């Protein structure tokens, strides 16, 4: 295993300016010059993309920019000791020691463990002091190597020093509150381990027993269930989802970004201790936990909870819709549109087999099979939507009542709107029943029998007896209105759908428009193609934002940062595949220019597609499901027109919609309006 750092990867007392970007670029150049990465631009772009997620400055004048990159050939450390400090976003000021950690996309565990050792060592003041006083690059390499790859003598010395430090530390009092913690960051290389060590040190100083599970790239050792059970509270210092979250259900919880675990470990320990003794503290939710008088773990207000539940339902519904819709489209391709008329497909499947083919032949028979599979898959659309809305509210006990309520909504003709209402009802009722205080012997039956039974009766009963009829009437009226739209009315609807698709690029407004479109697919027929037209409109409009950003970065590269230009390359494929989220990096960096530009082009595309009667029998796939697009030429033309309009708008706004910088800002800077 080659050395992680060499003298050629060290820049001593370098004057690289105060901007993190220039420091990172210089270190990336050192890595490439040492033959450890294939290109500067790719490595620099990946490091800056990681920097944009979370600042990598940490207390003590340190910074640890890091990334995984396909440009990296072997795990590498590069270090700069700066003559002029650079601001990497630490709360206590700029950094003079910068370690750049570059890992390949598939780094092996051995190397990742060494990188984790370095990250943890940066929390030790004597280690950083020795780096600041080192006289040469060779001395820096020796200091770092002694930490990440110590020999046996060094290991023994380190263990002795650790034992002495532990002996000098106040012992944890018997019966004192114990805590557990999870630390995790997106790359799992540095922040994960530094936060763990900072929390352990703060807990030891406070006389608290703390055990930490690091969910990083170097692997993890799960906490002992007995330790979790005995803990008074849990700290989640994470920027990603916690693996095995169900282990902590019912525990008082402190949620924080992983960087806060590094910057404010003492405060997190204090908050966890307070939560452990507070009966009203937020708790890890999920299932019907014993003693479940839990307040909302995330502290969301009602609107946020409803939005999260809706987006969860839509995200789980999409695989049913995508698979079913594509199968129906393939069925049409093989057997023709008449396979959807009346009971044609059922009649074919009832009378024919592989050994007794219909007169039309094998291809026709396979088309009927694919169409029927797709239609059955689409039948899960409303139940899945309702079931996973309920799941987002009440966890697993809400799934069955939600599916049943969704099935009732479908049976009564309440459709997409009924599924939303049924899912919300089922989730709320299931969560309410789960909050009941019941005897210990009954707790095991609550999530698997009692909650599903009672919540299904209440939610589905309300749908049958009270809500289903009015919602079905509303749905029928809406469908009739849409079916009858033509001319200017259809164009107006296309504009509205286009604006919704580009407004938040995969957010709630975008998802509502998409869910509205796919919910109508199951009702489409050869005689009533309005739902197919709406689907084509939504798909085409959703393809415009990423394609427009890709085009803009190609036409005028100087208006965009290096990271944006790299994102622009990927946006071509994302846009062609109907993944609107490909434009999010551009919108996040410059929302006031990018979002209006995207909305302008998407609305134009929506109007053209809806007005010209283009249809899509597939709910997803973009240009790659061309066989399911009716009038594919007009579909492509409408997308091209919208893309050019949005790209031209964003270029014009970036060139001319600027204001002069105030006197205290550097001259020549572009300031977003």
Image: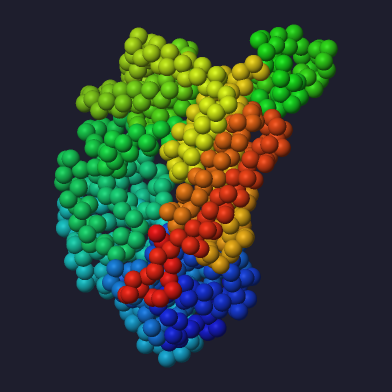
Q: Is residue 113 visible?
A: no
Of residues 520 and 208, the one nearer the viewer is: 520
Q: Residue at x 37, y 53 (%)?
A: 238
In which quarter of the view is residue 147 placed?
A: bottom left
Report the coloring of the rendering. rainbow
Measured as percent of width and height from the top left, residue 469 is found at 40, 11
Q: Is residue 75 visible?
A: yes
Task: Relative to 358, say whether 552 is above or below.
Answer: below
The residue at the far bottom in this view is: 135
Q: Residue at x 72, y 16 (%)?
A: 338
- Assign the C terminus to one quadrant of the image: bottom left
Task: Relative to 427, say whether 365 is above or below.
Answer: above
Measured as percent of width and height from the top left, residue 207 is found at 19, 61
In which quarter of the view is residue 249 placed?
A: top left
Image side of residue 671 versus residue 226, left or right: right
Measured as percent of width and height from the top left, residue 161 is found at 32, 75
The residue at the far front in this view is: 488
How many circles with numbers are drawn on the protein? 0
Measured as percent of width and height from the top left, residue 670 is found at 44, 67
- Assign the N terminus to one quadrant of the image: bottom right
Of residues 373 and 565, the one nearer the viewer is: 565
Q: Residue at x 33, y 75 (%)?
A: 663
Of residues 438 and 150, the one nearer the viewer is: 438
Of residues 103 and 98, the one nearer the viewer is: 98
Task: Relative to 276, say whether 529 is above or below.
Answer: above
Image side of residue 290 versus residue 191, left or right: left
Q: Residue at x 63, y 42 (%)?
A: 639
């Amino acid at each position: 295993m080659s050395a992680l750092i060499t003298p050629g990867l060290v820049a001593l007392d370098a004057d690289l300016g105060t901007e993190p970007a220039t420091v990172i670029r210089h270190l990336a150049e050192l890595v490439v010059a040492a033959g450890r990465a294939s290109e500067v631009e790719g490595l620099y772009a990946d490091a800056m993309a990681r920097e944009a997620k979370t600042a990598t400055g940490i207390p003590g004048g340190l910074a640890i920019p890091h990334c995984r990159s396909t440009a990296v050939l072997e795990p590498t450390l590069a270090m700069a000791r700066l003559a002029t400090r650079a601001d990497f976003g630490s709360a206590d000021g700029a950094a003079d020691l910068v370690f750049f950690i570059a890992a390949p996309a598939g780094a092996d565990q051995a190397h990742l463990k060494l990188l984790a050792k370095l990250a943890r060592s940066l929390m030790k003041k004597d280690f950083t002091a020795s780096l600041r006083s080192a006289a040469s690059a060779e001395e820096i390499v020796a200091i770092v190597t002694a930490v990440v790859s110590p020999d046996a003598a060094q290991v023994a010395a380190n263990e002795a020093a650790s034992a002495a430090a532990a002996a000098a530390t106040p012992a944890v009092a018997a019966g004192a509150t114990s805590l557990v913690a999870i630390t995790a960051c997106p790359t799992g290389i540095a922040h994960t381990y530094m936060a763990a060590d900072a929390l352990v040190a703060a807990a030891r100083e406070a006389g608290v027993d703390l055990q930490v599970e690091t969910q990083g790239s170097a692997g993890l050792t799960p906490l002992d269930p007995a330790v979790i059970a005995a803990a008074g509270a849990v700290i989640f210092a994470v920027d990603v989802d916690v693996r095995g979250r169900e282990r902590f259900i019912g525990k008082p919880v402190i949620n924080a970004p992983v960087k806060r675990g590094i910057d404010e470990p003492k405060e997190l320990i204090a908050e966890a201790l307070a939560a452990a003794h507070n009966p009203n503290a937020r708790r890890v939710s999920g299932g019907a936990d014993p003693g479940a008088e839990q307040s909302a773990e995330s502290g969301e207000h009602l609107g946020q909870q409803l939005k999260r539940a809706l987006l969860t339902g839509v995200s789980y519904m999409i695989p049913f819709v995508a698979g079913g819709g594509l199968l129906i489209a393939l069925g049409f391709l093989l057997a023709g549109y008449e396979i959807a008329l009346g009971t044609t497909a059922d009649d074919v499947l009832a009378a024919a087999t592989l050994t007794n083919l219909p007169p039309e032949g094998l291809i026709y028979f396979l088309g009927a099979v694919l169409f029927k599979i797709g239609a059955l898959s689409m039948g899960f659309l409303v139940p899945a939507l309702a079931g996973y809305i309920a799941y987002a509210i009440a966890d697993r006990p809400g799934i069955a009542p939600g599916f049943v309520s969704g099935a009732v909504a479908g049976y009564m003709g309440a459709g997409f709107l009924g599924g939303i209402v049924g899912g919300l009802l089922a989730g709320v009722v299931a969560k309410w029943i789960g909050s009941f205080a019941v005897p210990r012997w009954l707790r095991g039956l609550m999530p698997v029998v009692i909650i599903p039974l009672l919540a299904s009766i209440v939610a589905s009963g309300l749908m049958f007896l009270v809500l289903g009829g009015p919602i079905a009437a509303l749905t029928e009226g809406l469908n009739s209105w849409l079916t009858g739209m033509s001319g200017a009315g259809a164009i107006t609807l296309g504009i509205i759908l286009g604006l919704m698709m580009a407004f938040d690029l995969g957010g709630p407004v975008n998802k509502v428009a998409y869910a509205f479109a796919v919910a109508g697919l199951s009702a489409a027929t050869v005689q009533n193609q309005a739902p197919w037209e709406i689907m084509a409109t939504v798909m085409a409009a959703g393809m415009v934002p990423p394609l427009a950003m890709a085009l803009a970065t190609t036409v005028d590269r100087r208006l965009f940062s290096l990271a944006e230009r790299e994102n622009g390359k990927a946006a071509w494929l994302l846009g062609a595949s109907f993944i609107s989220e490909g434009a999010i990096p551009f919108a996040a960096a410059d929302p006031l220019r990018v979002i209006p530009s995207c909305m302008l082009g998407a609305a134009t595309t929506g109007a053209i597609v809806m007005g010209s009667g283009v249809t899509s029998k597939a709910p997803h796939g973009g240009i790659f499901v061309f066989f399911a697009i009716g009038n594919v030429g007009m579909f492509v033309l409408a997308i091209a027109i919208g893309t050019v309009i949005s790209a031209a708008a964003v270029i014009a706004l970036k060139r001319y919609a600027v204001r002069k910088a105030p006197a205290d800002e550097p001259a020549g800077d572009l300031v977003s309006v």
